[in-house]
Amino acid sequence: MKLHRLHRRDFLKSTAAAALAGSGAFGALGRALAAEPLNFFAWSAGVDQVKAHISAFEAKTGIKVNYGNAPWAQYRDTLVTKFVGKAPLDVLWVSDAWLPEWAEAGWLAPIDGYPQLLKYNADVDDFSTKSMMWKGKQYGLTYYTDYMGFFYDEGMLQKAGISAPPATWDEVVQQSLKIKKAGLSEYPLMLSMARETWLIEFLSALVFSHGGRFVDDSGAAVMQDKNKGAHEALTWIVDAVQKHRIVSPACVEIGELNGLKAFTSGQHAFAMLGRYRIRTLNDPKQSQIAPRARQALMPRGPHGKNATVGWNRFYGLTTAAAKDKAKAAEAVKFIEWFVGKADGQYAFQKLMFTDVGSGFAVKSLFKDPDIIKAYNQYSDIKMYEKQQALAQKKDVIAPWFGEWDEVNGTAFQAAVVGKSPIDDALKRSADTWNKLRRRA
Amino acid sequence: MTALALRRASRAPVNRYDQAAALWLLAPMLAVLAVVAVFPVLYSLWVSFFDLRLTRPHRVPFVGFDNYVDVFQDELFWQSVWRTTSFTLICVVAIMLIALAMALLLNEEFRGRRFLSAMLLVPWAIPYVANGLMWKWIYDSGYGALNGILFQLDFIDKYMVWLGDSKKTLWLIANAFVWKEVPLATILVLVGLKSIPADLYSAARVDGANTWARFIHITLPSLRPSFMLVVIYETMMAIRHFDLFFILTEGGPAEASHVLAWHVYVETFRKLSFGTGSALAYIMAIVTFVLAFWLIRALGKKL
């Protein structure tokens, strides 16, 4: 009996050992035979275009790509959780707003060591390249760049007897009052000031067009300074809502998408929207004001120069991928395929522009006949290019941006709805910025 | 088996084998509970003593009770406590009054009562997110049904701003909450009404009590257990409520609807500051527990 037990135990032990050894050996062999795919994660935009371009990349290089995506609204949280949980990530889409946070956390790797990527900088708008830099290092290559645009309904302006769009914010007030008086619109200017990620883009555009800044070159808050433009911009917004009544007091509950819908329904004469929205504005299937929507330069304040805010989304390389030479080489090929030239042309950026209408930072694409033809069907490519040249990167992008943005959005809203004096709102925003900066 | 035999059986010592078997049978579920309930609760308590920010994974210093101190020193926290208290009071009082009125109505015999009872359950069956989206449409200042109806009935001469008006925001969210919660409260009160013996009313009638006197002296006192249940449940629900604030206003405009639950969300999931978020969640849980305990003691004594 004892002998029998020993035999059985021995048998079990040896079987288990063989199974473990076998699984390890076969596992290693399997991994060697089937190379691990490149893990690419993006938000759920242009999914079909991305998939098609990935297929072409796989066919061309033989490198397999594992593509995943998450909605934009949950993207930052999803990625942060993935990073913390050490999920496999090699290449990903990054927003300029998160760059310092992710770079400081050590999740993103600079691409300065890859000349095959950096060579594309020469053909990219300056503000766009700056948006991908943190502490002197570049962390990616842009596939999508755009800016906040100023649009008007040409038909409504003509009905009000206005021959040219406003060039200054004062003219916006004067023209709006004229349109209001003519009974064409109760609130001629559409501003979306709901608390969402868009809010900082709207606010930055207003501040920059007034020649202002939130922070100076050293990173200290200047938004509370009456001579630095932000004060002037917020005063203008508050007056537009409370004094002139050319902007609806409901602006604090109107998000960007609802603002777009309101403008396309013909309720307003002017609107601030993402530049890429012009395609929707002049699409008769989606807009009642089509084809009368026009883009003008962002109006300027007394000390401004028609500047606007630009934003940037780019392909980033993770630190984990950069550490593995072979993986990094594949990732760089992948990034170049998407953002640089694939088979001799900026294929992906052209595809995204023609299919989805998303913008680009590649200067030579403004001369591309296909792009010009496609864009001029619903807008003016020269105006697009002219305004893009005046775009600036957001000056508040820092590792503490998300935390500060919560307070800043609330402070601006409080001033707009009359719950807080302008000085107090900006002081609160500035104090929060300085406190977070000190803590960091 | 007689009642005496049952009592004896219940007092009989449990066989040691049975105890061991019971323990083994319960073990899988205890293990699951330990993993999904006990561990996260204890772990979040542990986290609340660290300055844990997900975006700063390499530096997680132990800060003791600093997170709790920071929370109590934060002016916005106290503002959100005040707003949560206001919201809870508005909601619980409104739910109690409406539920009582509805229950009294449904306790009467009339044609269509069953249909009305079924219809009453509709808001309860709608998920909170769908409810929030529905009210967002209703309150919209541009195309909302509320403006449309009021305008067509000549109550207003132009479309009003609803959620964007900080003076109205909390009331409007409370309205959406009450609409959703009234059905359950009505059912609980109705059950209480049905359990009042008819003899009490007959005797009161013989003694010359009118309808009002019967309501004050028989109906209301008899409904105390139902009221207690409704008050405790709805207070807990209102204090912890998050969904409508997320969908309708995201805490705005300015900070007009920045309640405690929203405060926890912002700290934890927007700022990704899990240390402070955990501390806040614990404070909220303790407050809720103490309040529930106090309500049970205070109202329970009168039962």
Image: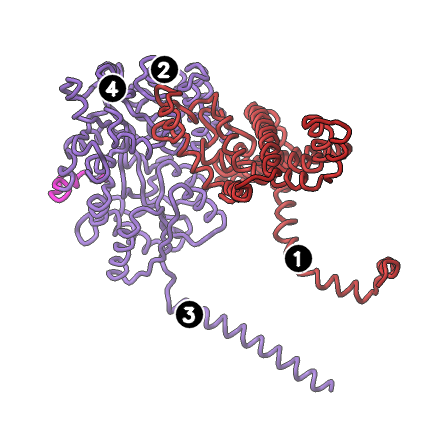
Label 3 element class: helix
**Foreground mark, 3 or 4?**
4
The chain to which mark 4 is attached is: A
* SS majority, magenta: helix
Give the CA distance from mark 3 to mark 4: 63 Å
Give the CA distance from mark 4 to mark 2: 21 Å
Give the CA distance from mark 1 to mark 3: 36 Å
Is A364 within the magenta?
yes
Supply the letter of whichever chain is purple. Answer: A
Q: Earlier in the sequence, mark 3 or mark 2?
A: 3
- Could you confirm whether marks 2 and 1 are on the same chain? no
**Hey, which quadrant is residue B254 in on the image?**
top left
Q: Which residue is labeled 4 in the image?
A: A300
Label 2 sits on what residue type?
Gln
Supply the letter of whichever chain is red. Answer: B
Give the magenta part as a residue range: A360-373
Residue occupying image coordinates x 59% and y 29%: B88
Label 3 sits on what residue type?
Gly
Q: Which residue is labeled 2 in the image?
A: A242
